[in-house]
Image: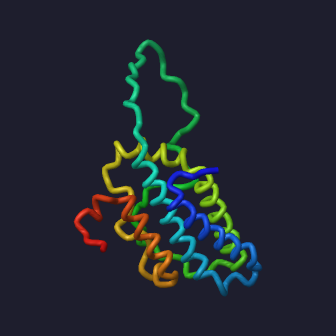
Amino acid sequence: MSHPRPDLWYPIARLLAVLRRLLHAAAPEAFAHIALNARAQLAALTALVRRYIHVLAAGIILPPPRETTPQTDGPAPPSNTPGARHYTFPLIESPARASPASAGEDPPALQWALLMQAAARLAAVLANPAPHARRLARRFGTLTVPGLRERPAPWHVIRRLGPGIDTLLLRLDQAARPQAWAGLDTS
């Protein structure tokens, strides 16, 4: 199976596999010892996958939107969905909320289960990135704010991880946001 942009996909897949092996090997009761590192890896992987999707979406050329004629001769059909759709993986990074973050007060077994679920979601997105990239490509025309934050991950997360992940984050950020990197000398 070939993946789009294998130069970016394979390093992300390897890092995700390492995180999933770490989570599978850890006992949920004893998870507190590795929780900080696992959360840091998950934050970096989420930023990596999101930037990978942005790189793929930038390469998609969509056909012009179809023209629709408004129907005025009948009542509007009832809608079963009262609000907008909720996707399992948000493609747009929203600014961090000012609410106090959990400092690990949750039981270790719950933290483990939540991280396992988040890692499984990332694996599903990475296994089939095309629909997410198409959805993001359709959103590019309507975005009023940048889709990605200036910093891929907070400094304390990057500090906890190795320089290889930092380098990959910078490489993906440069590919996902070329206008932001246009005037910088990266040599």
> Quick check: 78 left or right of 61?
right
Residue at x 50%, y 75% (from the top left corner): 165
The location of residue 8, given as percent across then percent down, is: 50, 61
The location of residue 184, given as percent across then percent down, is: 25, 69
The relative height of residue 150 versus residue 145 in the rendered view (above or below) is: below
Residue at x 61%, y 77% (from the top left corner): 38
Quadrant where the image shows the C terminus: bottom left
The relative height of residue 171 versus residue 140 in the rendered view (above or below) is: below
Q: Which picture quadrant has residue 127?
A: bottom right
Of 74 and 38, the residue lying toward us: 38
The location of residue 79, given as percent across then percent down, is: 54, 31
Residue at x 40%, y 49% (from the top left corner): 58
Q: Which picture quadrant has residue 51?
A: bottom left
Q: How is the image coloured?
A: rainbow
The relative height of residue 163 versus residue 178 in the rendered view (above or below) is: below
The relative height of residue 79 versus residue 135 in the rendered view (above or below) is: above
Give the number of marks: 0
Q: Which picture quadrant has residue 109?
A: bottom right
